[in-house]
Amino acid sequence: MAIKLKTDKDIAKMRVAGRLAAEVLEMIGEYVVPGVSTEELDRRCNEYIRKVQKATPANVGYHGFPKTLCTSVNSVVCHGIPKPSEVLQDGDIVNIDVTVIKDGWHGDTSRMYFVGTPSPEAKKLVETTYDAMMAGIRVVRPGARLGDVGHAIQKLAEAQGYSVVREYCGHGIGKVYHEDPQVLHYGRPNTGLLLKEGMTFTVEPMINLGDADVEQLDDGWTVVTRDRSLSAQWEHMIAVTKNGFEILTPWPRKG
């Protein structure tokens, strides 16, 4: 496994790209309402990235992916393709995942949105998934191991009766969109890759209300829960620092 350690200058550039990605998710939030199509959300984000941020949407054309965003609604686990026919309804939950490229460096983040008023079980799933992501991030430091990260996520999610998707994981990132290491969202303490200062990767757990099993639809991208139960995901891009971690995609706060 060839891990590319980043310098302080590299991380400064990733910080810029990460901030831009987070700004996209902040911008689009007010448009995530009942009656909007995921195609419309995608169009707005593409325009914002290109025209306002003067950056590049990394997903467009990546391995043939056609859109700027992944929009994963309700039972969609990840890689949902925005389309005009997909219109959000009151009570839906949706993950919006975006990656931008600025000066050659990637910024990758995703977050959950409530469309109108969510059900109590949907709200709890979304909030628990966020807590699980943060639990994984908080154990990151030089000398920790990736198994510690996965274990923290798995322990918190399963304590609430949820399941952790096994087939998809976080990843190293930098000038390359997906590089080593793979960051599993389950695991055992004191196992896996030893973390070192300068590593940069995403933590992005996918947590299901029902069983962990997933399947890919015929479009070759969209992944759904096999039992069609709700799924939630949050994602931050982080750097391993001298004494711990830095979130490179902190969400802006209005007001």
Image (cartoon, grey):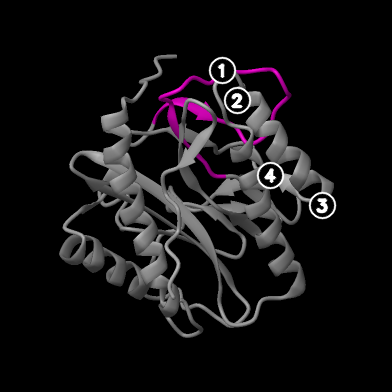
Tell me which residue sits at (42%, 53%) in the image: 219
Q: Which residue is mark 1?
A: 193
Q: CA distance from mark 1 to mark 3?
A: 27 Å
Residue that protrudes farthest toward the top in the picture: 1
Queried whether the magenta region covers residue 181, the answer comes back as: yes
Question: Residue 111 location, x and y as percent?
Answer: 51, 59
Q: Amino acid at mark 1?
A: Leu
Residue that protrudes farthest toward the front in the picture: 243
Q: Would residue 124 be seen by someone viewing this image from the given angle?
A: yes
Q: Are marks 3 and 2 in contact (CB under 8 Å)?
A: no
Q: Where are the magenta residues, as a range? A: 179-204
Sequence-earlier tag: 1 or 3: 3
Q: Which residue is mark 4?
A: 213
- Apparent side of residue 74 relative to residue 95 in the rendered image (left or right): right
Q: Which mark is nearer the camera, 2 or 4?
A: 2
Q: Amino acid at mark 3?
A: Gln
Tell me which residue sits at (59%, 39%) in the image: 137
In the picture, the quarter occupied by the C terminus is bottom left
Q: CA distance from mark 3 to mark 4?
A: 18 Å
From this view, report whether residue 68 is shown above or below residue 8: below
Q: CA distance from mark 1 to mark 4?
A: 26 Å
Q: Amino acid at mark 2?
A: Leu
Q: CA distance from mark 3 to mark 2?
A: 22 Å
Q: Which mark is nearer the camera, 3 or 4?
A: 3
Q: Which residue is mark 2?
A: 146
CA neighbours of label 3 inside 10 A, class few (<14), some (14 to 19), many (20+): few
Q: Which residue is mark 3?
A: 160
Question: Residue 109 location, x and y as percent?
Answer: 43, 51
Q: Main secondary structure of the magenta part?
A: loop
Sequence-earlier tag: 3 or 4: 3
